[in-house]
Amino acid sequence: MTVVQADAEVTTGSPAPPERRHRGVPKTLLNLLSVVLGVGVWWGFSLGGFDIPAPPEVLKRGGELIADGTLADDVLASLGRVLAGFMLGVALAVPVGFLMGWYGVVRGLVEPWVQFFRTIPPLAIIPLAVVLMGIGETPKIFVIFLASFLACVIATFQGVVGVDKTLINAARVLGAKDGTIFARVVVPASTPFILVGMRVGLGSSWATLVAAELIAAQQGLGYRMQSAQLYYDLPTIFVGLISIGVLGLLMDRVLLFAERRLTNWQERR
Amino acid sequence: MITIDRVGKSFAMKNDRFVALENVSLEVAENEFVTIVGPSGCGKTTLMNILAGLETPDAGQALVRGARITGPGPDRGVIFQQYALFPWLTVRKNVEFGLRTAGVPNPERRERAQHFIDLVGLHDFADALPRMLSGGMKQRCAIARAYAVNPSILLMDEPFGAVDALTRVRLQEQLLQTWSQEKRTVVFITHDVDEAVFLANRVVVMAARPGRIVEIVDVDLPYPRTEELRLSPDFTALRNRVWSAVYHQEPVA
């Protein structure tokens, strides 16, 4: 997240742009209603003879897992892997994406590989990663790294390529040379793309996590669900699923918040 | 002083070449206000890009005070039709952009930016982001930004093309007011005949295929130009003359 420089500061005290708000029911209320309805449907299915645990049962198991510390340990283990892989991926993707967008040579050299690996689901890399890197943390973090790198590098590259030519010309006629144009026009102009890439990358990191934890993990939400599967322990699987969903959502919100703050200058429809 | 000497420029098309400019020669005097009108495809934007140093001519040369134009330079300020404000910078930071690249130290930078922000009447919006401004205000900010680096020449490419007719009239008056306070050589491109006559010392009429100058009309009307002048018979006569020069060319496909 080092891509936005101090110049991109924005005023908060200036008049707010006219916002179109929908009249009637507020959005948060609708969201809440939707959640309640969804849980209701779930409960309905469970009562209606489907072989799934009812919400109270899952809630109870959740309480137990929290009480004995298992859930916290699993969450920490999973979060650690996702964050490590994701941050490494982004840290490499942003400079590589910039170089690809800015220098035709780098683009020509790197793009075939990026496109090639993009067509391989990160999960398909797991067997190779295990053979080469063993069954420790490394292969797990590696596949998550790969997933987030690929999502983010493409977005950064697209952002750089898509910078409005008029803005670059405007900077040139104001006396800016290549270095200045890069730092003060290309970087801020592609920030929205990078942040979208980071959100997509985070999504695929989470998606890859569970599968990565199927490789002989001792801890983690994916491992917990995998072992619950052996004992037909559906409530634990549900607790795991919900935890992954909630954590993913929270992390996405954090990025969305950052995006709003950093790209507040964008005209939004 | 600008000298355009037998400039030619063509672009490759699918099958043949599109001649944007052919044998175009023009001299613009110091502090003169010249407008260029012509139908689309007459090469007026290409001509401006050559003057700005964003494109190089295939034939002939363009000179500023005897020196050949080889690239963009701080002696020439450019105002684009699409405003081209940096959307992540406030009005003030946009105006300061050129001063920063020129390495003007902060107290002076701020002062000069403020001066031109005031000059175009944007002082209440100095800390607003471009997305909060109307089209007319954006263009005024772009004018302030170009003025701030103190160029001797202002190149304006249909700057008021995207604003409504009423705003355009006000922007024209304001531009002339700014220009009379801070005299510069101005090359102003437009497709609006009224605008061309109202602003200029001289109106250059261009034609397309190939892009060339067909007529140069001297506008010997006094400044400051007022609404009365806009409605006067003298203005109308000149306007009609330019109109027929623009619209009674051989039909363009």
Image (tube, rainbow, N blue to C red):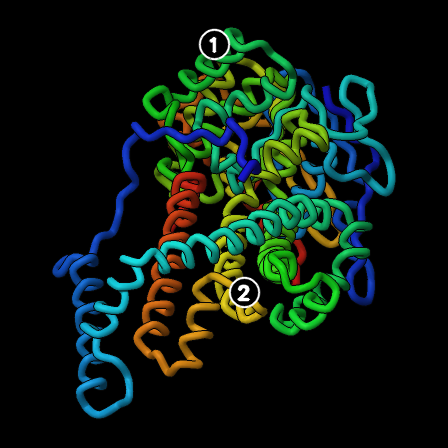
Between circles 2 and 1, the one closer to the viewer is 2
Give the amino acid type for the residue marked by disc 1 in the picture: Glu
State whether residue A135 is above or below residue B233. Answer: below
Q: Which residue is situated farthest in the left direction here?
A: A24
Q: Residue at x 55, y 52 (%)?
A: A86
Residue A16 left/right relative to B130: left
Tell me which residue sits at (51%, 59%) in the image.
A200
Same-subunit check for callouts 2 and 1: no
The alpha-carbon separation of the residues under discs 2 and 1 comes to 63 Å
Q: Which residue is mark 1?
A: B111
* Residue A79 in the figure: left or right of residue A67: right
Element at label 2? loop
The answer to whether residue A130 is left or right of residue B142 is: right
Residue A221 is left or right of residue A115, and the answer is left
- Name which residue lies at 46% across and 33% down: B139
Image coordinates for residue B24, horizontal then vertical, percent = 78, 38
Callout 1: SS:
helix
Give the residue displayed 82% in from the left and 39% down from the top.
B57
Residue extending furthest toward the right: B59
The residue tagged 2 is: A217
Residue A207 in sight here? yes
Q: Residue furthest top?
A: B107
B183 and B89: which is toward the camera: B89
B141 or A16, which lies in front? A16
Q: Residues within 10 Å of mark 1 (few under 14, many from 20)?
A: few
Read off the chain for label 2: A
Q: Residues within 10 Å of mark 2 (few under 14, many from 20)?
A: some
Residue B50 location in percent, x, y? 74, 36
Q: Position of residue B178 (x, y in %)?
A: 47, 18
Estimate the x, y position of residue A99 in percent, counting from the top left: 72, 45
Q: Return the residue nearer the eye: B195 or B231.
A: B195
**Viewer-nearest residue: B116 or A202:** A202
